[in-house]
Image (tube, grey):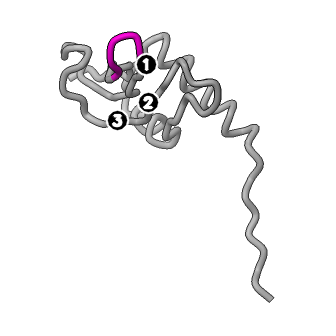
Amino acid sequence: MALKIRLSRIGSTHNPIYHVVVAEARSRRDGASTEVLGTYNPRAKKDGLILRIERADYWLSKGALPTDTAHSLIKLARKAAAAAPAVVETPAA
């Protein structure tokens, strides 16, 4: 069973929205998926990509191959996560 990380379209006509999914390589584009990793809205100005990087890393470690577009989105999500400031909790006094 060969797995791929790829995009699955869920948007309506002239309004593309995609799920980033892990699916079997031979399944249809919008067919059954193993897991949904996040969403991608190419028309959004801000927060167009929501992706669970730790789950993407898990599937990559298991041998899932990303498509070119999915690979670039994973790289973009990693870059955004690294640039985001870490949340530091202060102890209550």
Viewer-side residue, 58 vs 16: 16
Q: Determine crowd level at label 3: few under 14, some 14-19, many 20+ residues with C-alpha closer than 10 A.
A: some
Residue 59, percent from left and from top: 39, 34
Residue 87, percent from left and from top: 72, 58
The amino acid type of the residue labelled 1 equals Pro
Q: Nearer the viewer, mark 1 or mark 2?
A: 1
Viewer-side residue, 81 vs 64: 81
Contact check, label 1 and label 2, Cβ < 8 Å? yes
Viewer-side residue, 88 vs 54: 88
- Secondary structure of the residue carrying tag 1 is strand
- Secondary structure of the residue carrying tag 2 is helix
Which label number is shown at residue 32? none
User: Residue at label 1?
Assistant: 66
Say whether residue 15 is magenta.
yes
User: Residue at label 2?
Assistant: 60
Residue 13 picture quarter: top left
Q: Which residues are magenta?
A: 11-16
- What residue appears at the point 74 percent right and 69 percent down from the top-left corner? 89
Kindly report the distance in space between the C-alpha atoms of the residues bearing marks 1 and 3.
14 Å
Kindly report the distance in space between the C-alpha atoms of the residues bearing marks 1 and 2.
8 Å
- What residue appears at the point 56 percent right and 17 percent down from the top-left corner? 72
Q: Nearer the viewer, mark 1 or mark 3?
A: 3
Of pointers 1 and 3, the one earlier in the residue sequence? 3
User: Residue at label 3?
Assistant: 36
The amino acid type of the residue labelled 3 equals Val
- 87 in relation to 41, above or below: below
Of pointers 2 and 3, the one earlier in the residue sequence? 3
Q: Determine crowd level at label 2: few under 14, some 14-19, many 20+ residues with C-alpha closer than 10 A.
A: some
Query: What type of secondary structure mainly makes up the magenta span?
Result: loop
